[in-house]
Each structure stands twice: as C-alpha cells, then as structure tokens.
Image (tube, rainbow, N blue to C red):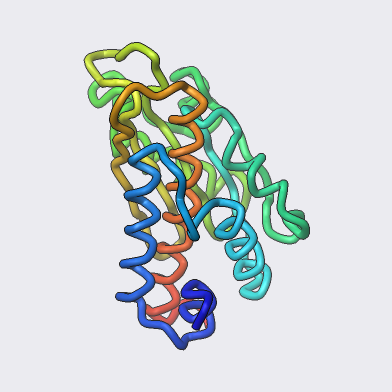
Amino acid sequence: MNNPYAAAMSGEGSARNIDTLLSSERAHSESGGSLGRFETEKSAPLLIDWMRELGLRLACAESLTGGMIASTLVGVPGASDVLNGGVVTYADAMKTKVLGVDADLLDEKTAYSPECAMSMAAGALQLFDADVAVSSTGVAGPESDLGVPAGTGFLGCATPYTMQVWPITVPGERTRQEIREAFTRGAIALVLRTLIHDRDKGHYE
C-alpha cells in the first residue's frame, strides 16, 4: 500500500509496523532535517482526517514550539472539525496558572522535564475539553538553559486512556526555527502513535 498511515488507520496495518514508521519520523525530527516522505505536509492532513473520522477533538499546550503545532494543524482544511484550541504557556508561571502544572514540580524538575510535558498535556486535555492533547517543552536555543542543551526537550500526549512522552534531541548547530520545526514534526508523529495505541487497545473503532 502506498500510504502506510492509511493502512494503520483502516486496520490493515499493524501497530508494530506503523510504530516503526513513526519512530522513523521521530528520528528525522531529532535530526532537524527533512522528513522525506513522512514530512509534516503529509502527516498533518492524515492526522486531521483520521481524528475527524473518529469524532475526536484535539488540544495543544505549547512552550518551545510557540504555537507552531496548532498553526501547522490549522493550515489543514477541515482543522476546525478537530482542533478545540491551543495555548502557549512560555513562562513557568503560566504553565501553573493556565494548565495547572504544579509549581513545586517546576522548581524540582524544571520545565525541561518529562513530568512537565505530561502535566501540560493533561492540563490541556481538561482545559479544552478535548479527547487528545499534545504538549511541547524544551530549549530552543541558541544557548543552553539550566544546563540543558539547545534542541533538547520533551513532547507529551494525553488521552483519557494513555499518557505518552517522547524525549527529543536535535543535534548540531540548529536555528531556533529549525528546532521548533523538528519538535512540531515529532509532536504530530506522537499524536498519531498515541491514537494507534489507543485504537489497538479497543478504545476507538
């Protein structure tokens, strides 16, 4: 089949096979380079189409990406059928005030942690009354922060059934734009993988 995502979505492909493909997309995200045939221009419409078919609503909680995930999805026709909303909580205080991220967690683990990514996604799921929420947090550069190198961070995805986190490291000297784009590609891949996981557990038809 020409479209491996379509195979997985229709039930013709296995979760293992699609996981391999999405892991490849994640690896491309971490390289900061082109996604080849899994570029965002293809994966974003696939995500919107599948979520529309499932009747699911999506929310975004962004820090490092600064709204790029939501903007990328809004660029797809029909996004209004899927996207409930998004929020950019760049400052730690806003992560706490808007998304309910525990201030002690931020003090202890910092915003550049898997715990923060998970809490941001969980907060967005509730805030936007969504079925799926994705989050991004990390260091966009060009300098390191709190000892965390530029291009390092985490993506989170929450549903009522699943919480997943991906660590992302974009190597080499990359611009802030390139790092944000890499995290955005990874975020879309993570949402797809999470939905496939939930579907294979019997949560979606």
Q: Position of residue 135 (x, y in %)?
A: 47, 41
Left or right, 59 with respect to 154, comes to: right
Residue at image location 43% in from the left, 30% down from the top: 179
Residue at image location 38% in from the left, 61% down from the top: 22
Looking at the rendering, which quadrant does residue 189 occupy? bottom left
Q: Position of residue 89 (x, y in %)?
A: 53, 26
Left or right, 80 with respect to 70, comes to: right
Left or right, 56 with respect to 144, comes to: right
Q: Position of residue 143 (x, y in %)?
A: 34, 11
In the rendered image, the vertical position of residue 45 relative to residue 203, given as above or below:
above
Looking at the rendering, which quadrant does residue 30 occupy? top left
Q: Nearer the viewer, residue 193 or 100?
A: 193
In this figure, what is the number of numbered marks?
0
In the rendered image, the vertical position of residue 136 relative to residue 11, given as above or below:
above
Residue at image location 29% in from the left, 19% down from the top: 107
In the rendered image, the vertical position of residue 52 relative to residue 143, given as above or below:
below
In the rendered image, the vertical position of residue 170 relative to residue 40, given as above or below:
above
Residue at image location 63% in from the left, 40% down from the top: 86
